Amino acid sequence: MPAYICPQDGTRADTTALTWCCPVCRGPWDLEFGAAGALSLNSLTGRVNSLWRYEEVLPLSSPTTTLGEGRTPLVPVTGTVSAKLDFLMPTLSFKDRGAVMLAELARRLSPERVVADSSGNAGTAVAAYCARASLPCTVYVPEGTSPKKTEQIRAHGAHLEIVPGDREATAAAARAAADVPGTFYASHVFNPYFLHGTKTYVYELWEDLGGRLPDAIAVPVGNGTLLLGAALATAELHARGLIDRRPELIAVQAEAVSPLAAAFRAGAEDLLPENPLPEDLLPDGPAGPAAATLAEGIAIPRPPRARAILAAVRESGGTFLTVTEDQIRAAQLDLAARGFYVETTGVACWAAVGGWTDRSVVVPLCGAGLKTGLAG
């Protein structure tokens, strides 16, 4: 039986409880569970064409909440750079990989309500999968969230709470609601089931590349859920002898909101003391870091899993890269000219590594352009 375990102090909890964080340090959980069996390329033949084909390495199986998520195309863009089209998921972003895990777990626990917080895409995904599971859902988003994303959340029947202020204020409001008895907090940050959903991104790469991985995997990083999922998958594949080396993890942040990149460059194991945004990046609209960058999905000033993110990048031999707002604008137009219409957060990795020629690298196109429109 899987169990929650706190990476900071070792506190444990049963996954059948609605305990959303470590009761001692209030930090996020990791998940302790054993794989159900061996996985091989040959064993995948004829399986369901979704991320659930990797059931041996997932903490849940036999889902009823699925919308057919996963198995997105891997498309060469240049001689060395390929793109994985995760914007072709049911809710048009990669967040479906983790949201289906949270909704399926919540369905089995039968809470009175589900709450989530998001800058947009995680909220739309949780709303959709809660609708699929017939679960009442409330999604908290910061003011300034893209109107198309809030429209999508409402369309799935979720109650929308728009929080004045930034992404951190939104998270605080959702966590207060999560403490109400009978509530399941579908947090893509605190609940590790989400990470075990996002790790299927790398299992799909491994399968599509015939049992290998590229030299590097680039990922946009805010709360780090895709990067930490990728780190889980590469560690599992390597431990089982299914790959002979682990690829570099290249973490990409917007220069305007890049706390992890700053900590990495300083050699720190955790975030540096908080600094105010430079005056030229202060927003004219709603207060908060999200307004300082077009890449709203990764505008996270204090990610709770910062230590784990920094450690994962270093352990892989990877690095952090940052991109400017002009680079984000140019990358979105460049990808559109190549046939890919991707939202502004989803183009960050292309902006950072699209010109690489010295090694193979995969970038995720992780949100559809229809979610934000073209950058102004």
Image (spheres, grey):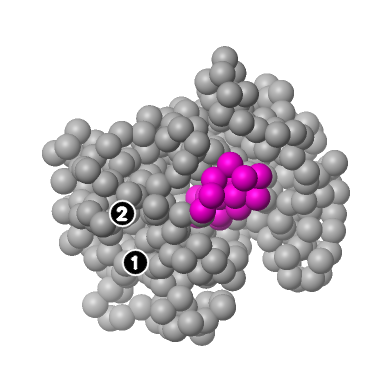
Q: Is residue 63 left or right of residue 319?
A: right
The image shows residue 196 at horizontal and vertical percentages of: 63, 44
Question: Against 50, is 215 above or below?
Answer: below
- Is 235 left or right of 335, judged from the image as shown? right
Confirm whether residue 319 shows in the render: yes
Q: Residue at x 78, y 31 (%)?
A: 108
Q: Main secondary structure of the magenta part?
A: helix
Could you give the CA–CA distance between mark 1 and mark 2, rounded to whole angstroms? 16 Å
Of discs 1 and 2, which sits in the foreground?
Answer: 2
Q: Quadrant of residue 328?
A: bottom left
- Name the residue at 62% across, 45% down: 241
Circle 1 residues within 10 Å: few <14, some 14–19, many ≥20: many
Q: According to the image, label 1 marks what residue?
A: 321
What type is the residue that disc 2 sits on?
A: Arg
Q: Amino acid at mark 1?
A: Leu
Q: Which residues are magenta?
A: 226-245
The residue wearing badge 2 is: 359
